[in-house]
Image (spheres, rainbow, N blue to C red):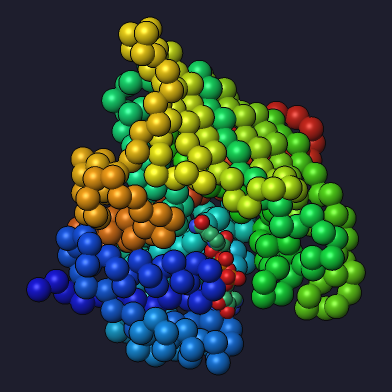
Amino acid sequence: MAKTLNVGIIGYGFMGRTHSNAYRKVANFFDVPYKPVLKTICGLEEKEAKAFADRWGFETYTTDWHEVIDDKSIDVVDICVPNNYHAEIAIAAAKAGKAICCEKPLALNVAQAKKMVDAVEKAGVPNLASFNYRRVPAVTLAKQLIDEGRLGKIFHYRANFLQDWTISAKVPQGGMSTWRLDVKAAGSGVTGDLLAHCIDTAMWHNGPISSVCAMTETFVKERVHAETGKVEPVGIDDACTFFCRFDNGSMGNFESTRYARGHKALYTFEINGEHASIAWDLHDLHRLSYFDHRDDSIVRGWRSVHVTDGDMPYMGKWWVPGLQIGYEHSFVHQTADFLTNMAKGKPTAPTFRDALATQKVCEAVLASAKVGRWKDITY
Ligand SMILES: NC(=O)c1ccc[n+]([C@@H]2O[C@H](COP(=O)([O-])OP(=O)(O)OC[C@H]3O[C@@H](n4cnc5c(N)ncnc54)[C@H](O)[C@@H]3O)[C@@H](O)[C@H]2O)c1
């Protein structure tokens, strides 16, 4: 019988739902060393917290995150709140000896992220930064193919993350549903929100980024703030494009915007190597496109690999070959790995330290855009 593991989730919004779902399902599908118990849900509004607890089966709810930290029976603190609360909660959780899963981006900036890394490493607590796209099976398979050397020397890594939801100047900034547009709550715009995902995946696939050259734009310069009711300057980047060099000599090209009309959440990447190329698209997340120049010329072409076979990453635990899974399963996979490593007293990649590296790239991107010059990154 697996030991029970008491989980406190802070934040019952979008990510609070994906993480609750993952803790509920993980032991049904994966051979994990713990049986997670949804102990406490925390969020700002009492009525909503109670309704969430009832719907998802939490034992209790609170509107004060300190209660989750102070509760000695809680083993795992899972942080699903806006970015400006990550550091304070994570540092308190580390001091209390809790295992911690924190949503991305790790922090508002590098200085905060460093303190978070120090706190978890000093306390020696298991930690995970929730860059969940690493655990979409097709994205994990891409890593496997690269590590096997199938692509050969890598020349290019390009990634996009495109949305279109802030084009209207009437969308407010700040408050419960539009905190992402308020620089004080989010830290940055598309760079920390969307490109951080692309950077995490890229550095996992292709190694560290050594220098960046970026441009950003804020198309709507002033918006009403939902909390003050006043028109205030917008401090986030609405769009960001950057070039980079990786340590391995390859070139990177990244773009993200919330102004690409027609795109809701189009995360794509393409990697070009000496022998082969790989491409992936979040809208078709269970497929991996693969081209291998070593194939016979008469059958050479892009293959669309349906990533559903039992010998493909994570897929042996789900249905039968040919039947696909979706977005929410990436959170189940990261939770399975988190619990497995936790039993060994280990952190799970991407660890807080890995997320600090991504934070450094994000900060260098924003600094480069500000001064209009290349920026080097040291880790
Ligand atoms: N991994 C991903 O793909 C992904 C996707 C979306 C969001 N995120 C990240 O997850 C985090 C949360 O984003 P979201 O979209 O779930 O936000 P959301 O707005 O849907 O939910 C935020 C939640 O935080 C709670 N909250 C806010 N301040 C609080 C406080 N002081 N104390 C307790 N609770 C508080 C709110 O009540 C709400 O339940 C952010 O860091 C975001 O960047 C990650």
Q: Quadrant of residue 345?
A: bottom left
* Residue 39 percent across, percent down from the top left: 34, 83
* Residue 205 percent across, percent down from the top left: 42, 34
Left or right side of 177 for 28: left
Residue 220 seen by the camera: yes
Left or right side of 91 for 33: left
**Up/down of 314 relative to 305, above or below:** below
Q: In the image, what residue occupies the spot 38% across and 17% down?
A: 292
Q: Residue furthest top?
A: 297
Left or right side of 257 for 372: right
Q: Residue furthest left?
A: 1
Count of numbered tags:
0
- As rendered, which of 33 and 127 lies closer to the eye? 33
* Residue 167 percent across, percent down from the top left: 79, 55
**Up/down of 217 relative to 112, above or below:** above
Residue 258 seen by the camera: no
Where's ligand 1: which quadrant? bottom right
Q: In the image, what residue occupies the spot 46% across and 71% down?
A: 17
- As rendered, which of 253 and 279 lies closer to the eye? 279
Q: In the image, what residue occupies the spot 47% across and 36% down?
A: 280
**Up/down of 377 relative to 59, above or below:** above
**Up/down of 64 relative to 235, above or below:** below
